[in-house]
């Protein structure tokens, strides 16, 4: 998941479906044979669906989601076929972005990538590199169901199709003094040596969120939307804090790889508390992969959270087909699958969702913050490696 809610309590629901798919007398023989030669070719080409390529990354639950949604869409829309390319979380989605950029610079279109899923940092990076198509409700009708402020924040260059937040996940059988604030969390870590873990921030969004939240803890609220490198000198107190905490975390400074790495430690009982994505916790609780004693809590101020985005390369030649797919993804039916499969917040406004789902989200989407520091995220991870992980 480089996957960038008060207590998060999400619920479930489900699905959708549907499908499609001649001679004469002697004087007209020439015309007849011409018609019979060209007509089947026309019919064949009309029946052949347009195929576009969709690159996405994330944990297994993301793959499970698209494995459910793509067949639903293709059944409803037989004139379009989706070719998915899955890149597992932690194996590096950056080459996908680089491929799109390199294809543009070489005059080779979009590099055969027609739709790309990723986080906010690559939306903003692509804005600078002029990679993404500007999207509108004129061509994607259900885009009108998305919060317009969210779209404005990204200049309509992506579809925020689902949302989640990083929260504290903890073993309620072991943890009775649950922190409410960041300072209380840091005190808890010091008082319970090796019972807290967070993953390497370059390998997953939950560890990234823990690090970023520490760096911006005492900075002005607007700083979390600032990508000016000048702000990096204000990170010093945050890195000092993270370095100090290093001797109290799991293994006295062992940082698991990927979001799943810390969840595995919580599941095995090696640690009692971790930062984690709410959707992953709920999904693994539902599957029995985490103990029933696992609970979640959002701090004040909250860890970061927000949407995952779908971007259309400006140079894609399959934009009409992609727009049909995006319209489907933003439909209440597909968004219901997002809620049930991903245990995530829908990408469209709750008022467009069925009443039972609206009720299940009351009070659940508050408390988290969206961070947008652009390319500074890379600097943050590199500095963390040298100053915190390497100590």
Image (tube, rainbow, N blue to C red):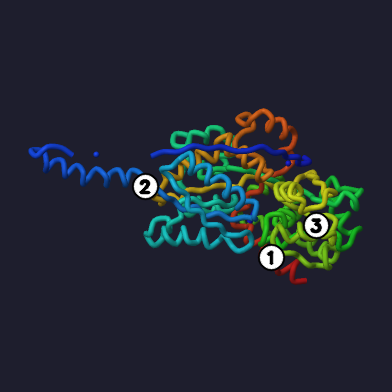
2 or 3: mark nearer the eye: 2
Total numbered circles = 3
Q: Give SS at disc 2.
A: loop
Q: Which residue is mark 1?
A: 383
Task: Relative to 255, say whether 117 is above or below.
Answer: above
**Residue in view at x 62 percent, y 45 percent:** 307
Res 305 seen here? yes
**Residue in view at x 64 percent, y 32 percent:** 350
Res 303 seen here? no
- Left or right, 133 with respect to 285, comes to left
**Residue in view at x 91 percent, y 58 percent:** 191
Q: Which residue is mark 2?
A: 48
Labels 2 and 1 touching (C-beta < 8 A): no
Alpha-carbon span between mark 2 and mark 1: 51 Å
Residue 315 pos. (x, y %): 40, 51
**Labels 2 and 3: the sequence-earlier one:** 2
**Labels 2 and 1: the sequence-earlier one:** 2
Can you tell which mark lies on residue 371? none
**Other-residue count near label 2 (Cα within 10 Å), few / some / many at <14 / 14–19 / ≥20:** few
Q: Give SS at disc 1.
A: helix
Residue closest to the eye, 295 or 221 = 295
**Residue in view at x 41 percent, y 60 percent:** 105
**Labels 3 and 1: the sequence-earlier one:** 3
Q: Give SS at disc 3.
A: helix
**Other-residue count near label 1 (Cα within 10 Å), few / some / many at <14 / 14–19 / ≥20:** few
Instruction: Please identify the quadrant where the N terminus is shown.
Output: bottom right
Q: Which residue is mark 3?
A: 267
Residue closest to the eye, 177 or 373 = 177
3 or 1: mark nearer the eye: 3
């Amino acid at each position: 998941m480089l996957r960038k809610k008060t207590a998060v309590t999400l619920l479930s629901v489900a699905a959708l479906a549907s499908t499609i798919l001649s001679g004469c007398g002697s004087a007209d023989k020439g015309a007849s044979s011409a018609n019979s030669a060209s007509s089947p070719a026309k019919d064949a080409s009309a029946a052949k669906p347009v195929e576009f390529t969709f690159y996405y990354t994330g944990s297994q639950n993301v793959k499970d989601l698209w494995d459910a949604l793509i067949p639903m869409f293709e059944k409803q829309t037989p004139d379009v076929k989706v070719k998915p390319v899955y890149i597992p979380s932690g194996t590096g989605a950056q080459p996908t972005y680089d491929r799109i950029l390199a294809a543009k610079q070489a005059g080779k279109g979009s590099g055969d990538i027609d739709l790309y899923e990723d986080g906010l940092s690559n939306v903003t990076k692509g804005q600078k590199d002029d990679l993404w198509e500007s999207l509108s409700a004129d061509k994607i009708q259900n885009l009108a169901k998305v919060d317009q402020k969210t779209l404005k924040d990204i200049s309509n260059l992506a579809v925020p199709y689902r949302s989640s937040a990083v929260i504290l996940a903890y073993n309620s059988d072991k943890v009775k003094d649950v922190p409410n604030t960041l300072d209380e969390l840091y005190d808890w870590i010091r008082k319970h040596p090796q019972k807290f873990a967070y993953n390497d921030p370059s390998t997953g969004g939950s560890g990234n969120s823990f690090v970023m939240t520490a760096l911006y803890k005492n900075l002005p609220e607007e700083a979390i939307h600032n990508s000016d490198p000048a702000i990096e000198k204000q990170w010093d107190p945050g890195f000092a804090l993270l370095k100090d905490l290093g001797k109290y975390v799991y293994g006295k400074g062992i940082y698991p790889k990927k979001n799943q790495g810390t969840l595995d430690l919580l599941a095995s009982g090696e640690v009692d508390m971790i930062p984690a994505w709410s959707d992953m916790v709920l999904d693994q609780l539902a599957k029995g992969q985490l103990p029933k004693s696992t609970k979640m809590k959002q701090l004040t101020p909250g860890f970061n959270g927000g949407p995952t985005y779908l971007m259309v390369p400006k140079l894609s030649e399959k934009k009409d087909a992609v727009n049909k797919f995006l319209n489907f993804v933003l439909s209440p039916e597909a968004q219901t699958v997002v809620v049930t499969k991903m245990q995530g917040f829908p990408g469209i406004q709750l008022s467009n969702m069925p009443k039972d789902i609206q009720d299940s989200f009351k009070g659940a989407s508050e408390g988290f913050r969206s961070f947008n520091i652009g390319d500074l995220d890379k600097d943050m991870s590199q500095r963390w490696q040298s100053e915190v992980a390497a100590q």
